[in-house]
Amino acid sequence: MGKLIKLDSLKADTLQEREGEWVYVKTWPRLGELPGLAFKVRSTNSPDYVTAKTSQQMKLTQKYGMETPPYNEVSIAEGELAAEYLLLDWKGLSEKYNSAEARSLLSSPEGRNILSMVFWCADQVGRRQVEFLEAAVKN
């Protein structure tokens, strides 16, 4: 007997993507172990985030045309979008979550490690545990 993957277990949990969930960051490259660090985030696939990101990209295209927008401007915009649409809370940090402080941090060059963690966590939201079924062998 072989195993078959249950199709529904591969589908994204779109409700969870919109409402958010806690995702733990156990380790991070060059930072090592990060015990207890977690971010409550919405998915990068949540409709509000995708719409806002697309709108921001259109604004940058209108402003710069075929030129590449300055890194600093793009970085600030990414941080602001993540703070507004993705990050809902955090735990395991010395400072309590505050949305205004989070926005400032995520849109600053010094906050890029945390911004990367928020995006990584947001990419995990809505994934389900894969389920298997026993398949009957045909004779």
Image: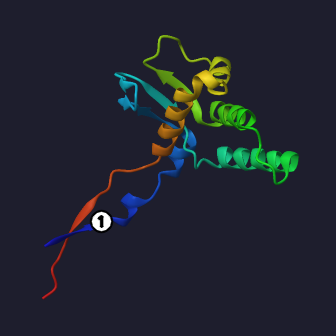
Residue 81: give x, y in percent of width and height.
68, 36
- Residue 47 vertical position relative to residue 110 in the rendered view, above or below: below
The residue under the point 47% across, 55% down is 12
Please, which residue is most extreme toward the top here? Answer: 94
- Side of 6 where 136 appears, left or right: left
The residue under the point 76% across, 44% down is 56
Residue 106: give x, y in percent of width and height.
62, 26
- Residue 132 vertical position relative to residue 71 in the rendered view, above or below: below
- Looking at the image, which is closer to me, 96 or 30? 30
The residue under the point 53% across, 45% down is 17
- Residue 80 vertical position relative to residue 36 in the rendered view, above or below: below
Looking at the figure, which quarter contains the C terminus? bottom left
The picture quadrant where one finds residue 132 is bottom left
- Looking at the image, which is closer to me, 9 or 55? 55
Residue 107: give x, y in percent of width and height.
67, 27
- Could you say whether the residue bearing mark 1 is in a helix, strand or loop? strand
- Looking at the image, which is closer to me, 4 or 75? 75
- Looking at the image, which is closer to me, 138 or 122? 122
Residue underneath mark 1: 5
- Side of 102 where 95 appears, left or right: left
- Side of 23 where 116 appears, left or right: right
Identity, as a three-letter code, of the amino acid under mark 1: Ile
Q: Residues within 10 Å of mark 1 (few under 14, many from 20)?
A: few
The residue under the point 64% across, 30% down is 83
Please, which residue is most extreme toward the bottom here? Answer: 139
Looking at the figure, which quarter contains the N terminus? bottom left
The picture quadrant where one finds residue 36 is top left
Residue 73: give x, y in percent of width and height.
75, 34
